[in-house]
Amino acid sequence: MSVHAGAPAGAVAHAERAGGLVVTAERLRAQLEALFTAWTGPEHARASAQTLVEADLMGIDSHGITLVPLYEELVRSGKIARDPQVGVAHAFGAVATIDGGGGFGHAPSLQAMDLAVEKARAFGIGAVGVRHSNHFGAAGVYALRAAAEGMIGVVTSAVHLPSIVPVFGRVPRMGTNPIAFAAPGAEGAPFLLDIATSTIAIGKLKLAAREGRSLPEGWAVDRDGKPQNDPEAALRDRMMTPLGGSRAMGGHKGYGLAAMVEILSTLLPGASYAPLRDPDAAHYDVGHFCLALHPDAFREAGGFGRDLDAFVACLRETPPAEGCERVLAPGDPEHAMRAVRARDGIPVPRSLADAARAIAAERGVRFLLEDPAE
Amino acid sequence: MSVHAGAPAGAVAHAERAGGLVVTAERLRAQLEALFTAWTGPEHARASAQTLVEADLMGIDSHGITLVPLYEELVRSGKIARDPQVGVAHAFGAVATIDGGGGFGHAPSLQAMDLAVEKARAFGIGAVGVRHSNHFGAAGVYALRAAAEGMIGVVTSAVHLPSIVPVFGRVPRMGTNPIAFAAPGAEGAPFLLDIATSTIAIGKLKLAAREGRSLPEGWAVDRDGKPQNDPEAALRDRMMTPLGGSRAMGGHKGYGLAAMVEILSTLLPGASYAPLRDPDAAHYDVGHFCLALHPDAFREAGGFGRDLDAFVACLRETPPAEGCERVLAPGDPEHAMRAVRARDGIPVPRSLADAARAIAAERGVRFLLEDPAE
């Protein structure tokens, strides 16, 4: 039995079949804002909540409300600052570095992208790094923020714990180090790429474990650095291959891309590289990187958006492979899902709703997701 | 029987066994400069030659003298301008776009990176696109040029013909669209990543064909979009998978990265996207993108280089997988090879030397590689 809290009728039946909830974006935002306020104070709670809701709206379910148990764990570890002071630490010309004050990464990263966009308006390009930060949700949310301002947005982030194992190695050296890239069209939706530099997401390991399937070679490695086929062991060790997997399939490329992300996100703004971090440090000191490019500074005004629309249309019109329905442009699934969920609501699986309810109770936060009166 | 032209004794024996030549970098540069002068005039010939020699020195053999037959073919097609006029077409703040005048891409791309570095000194960051260009050799050469000036360098390029097939598709929509990234250390050699966004290089197809091996699933697709196992057919069709290969192995990520490269290299500076290009256009109008970031503008002076050295050392010290000798940092193979070839010379296979000799003869250019008197 499920409860429908503030979402239209369309998604209810499916959610009830699955035993979960369907909630409106606004309801979810209010719930998350209350949790973030309890975790690290009111100042940045809305920014954090909205970032997670945006991910859930786009179907990036790994970076929405599903993060609540991880965030509770991070706060409990004491490695996240309460009432963080966010501010500019360095500034020069078209670049800057923001200090996140040891809190969650959402607020300083939104500030970073907004500042990068402002600089791109003035100089054609702007880049702002973030240090002394933590998990910031879905990188694509920040890249799209630039695109909404008519800019190309590029966002990378490090992760507080390593999980990508270098090619030929048997110890992880980098997080799943995401890259997001968004570019604005003239008429159409923005191009959007938002990827981890690992071959697959942790979520796929969980799915394989649940379904009792062994892992294909090239997703994860064991403690000897050999292919890991056991999904339970892979989940425990979290030793993922870089994009490409084995050397023969280009794993050295994904390894290099993950390292590039670490350099831009950690080394450039002066954050801490996880394997060399002082274990007694007060905070994780994770880093991020935001870049904005103003297309009209490179060419005739308006030309870029028109060309982008034509490019994306050409990708979509690629003749499909035998047995495939059609070819998607990067960002198509996210835009389509956003339209559906803005209308029908966001599904929340039963186990996740229960976990969020328990955390809310412990934190003295009202649980809004199943409250029809709210 | 081979002839040794101007290279030290160390590499001679191996080259003679292989029936090829070993030449000094200086000799190779002179030969290439003479060829480029015959192809498109003297003004940019030295820049083009030096770019190819740098690739050969670093062991990026696919982008050195081996390009001579392709370049001859490009010039013959009439799609490359003779005596191209290279100049700044747009400039605003920290960004600009250079027009390559329809010639080879090396000279305008060197100018683009030099201008990006100059802007990064003034603004902390600089980005310069190139349009109306052509093949520019190895992207890593330009990225390293930024690193030699103490900057992080990022370089991407489109390609005049498509060869990467989107996931779920059966027609190529992008070239092998490379990404290069270099970052300067304080003491150590620069970090260097230089990769195509396809799973593998064309050279691996050639090797498989020569050895009569069938291709592993995920390298190439056939005209129905299904995995292509026949190396001869793969070479003929040139339909490569994006990095990751199949959807299950993350091919959608490589597809998105190739598209990102196309947007930065082609759409941003206003070059021509190959599938939509007017077939009657005088030139190919290929585009490139160069970005420079000044680390000292983001954080305390000198901190970045020290952190980079520590990061790269940590990657190298990763415990190796069972059966593997050691873990490499991106750039290690190129730096090691450069030291060897600067000392011992650059090997040129017999078939390539013969092809270059024939092209030189047709162009009325003296063949220097086997001339002991030179």
Image (cartoon, coloured by chain):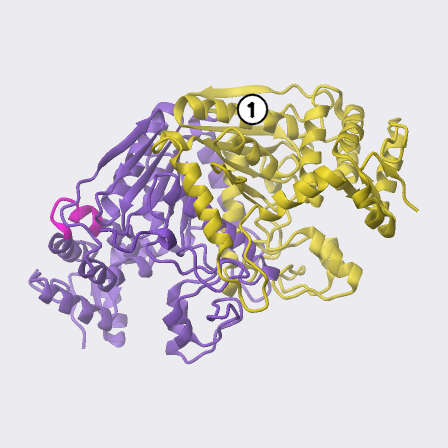
Chain colours: A purple, B yellow
Q: Residue furthest bottom?
A: A212
Report in which chain the residue with disc 1 lies: B
Q: Please state the horizontal and vertical placement of residue B108, each as a whole percent of the image.
A: 61, 26
Let me know if residue A41 is in the magenta part.
yes
Q: Is residue A316 visible?
A: no
From the viewer's perspective, is B292 left or right of B369? left
Q: Residue furthest right?
A: B1
What residue does disc 1 label?
Answer: B98
Report crowding for label 1: few under 14, some 14 to 19, many 20 or more residues within 10 A (C-alpha): many
Tally of marks: 1
Q: Is residue A242 above or below residue B159?
A: below
Tell me the quarter of the picture where residue A114 sits: top left
Let me know if residue A305 is in the magenta part.
no
Q: Please state the horizontal and vertical placement of residue B339, each as a whole percent of the image.
A: 66, 41
What secondary structure predominates along the stretch shown in magenta? helix
**Region rendered in magenta:** A40-49
User: Mark 1 belongs to which amino acid?
Assistant: Ile
From the viewer's perspective, is A34 left or right of B354? left
Q: For the C terminus of chain B, give its image quadrant.
A: top right
Q: Please state the horizontal and vertical placement of residue A291, each as a whole percent of the image.
A: 38, 37
Q: Please state the horizontal and vertical placement of residue A1, each as a whole percent of the image.
A: 18, 77
Q: Is residue A111 above or below residue A1?
A: above
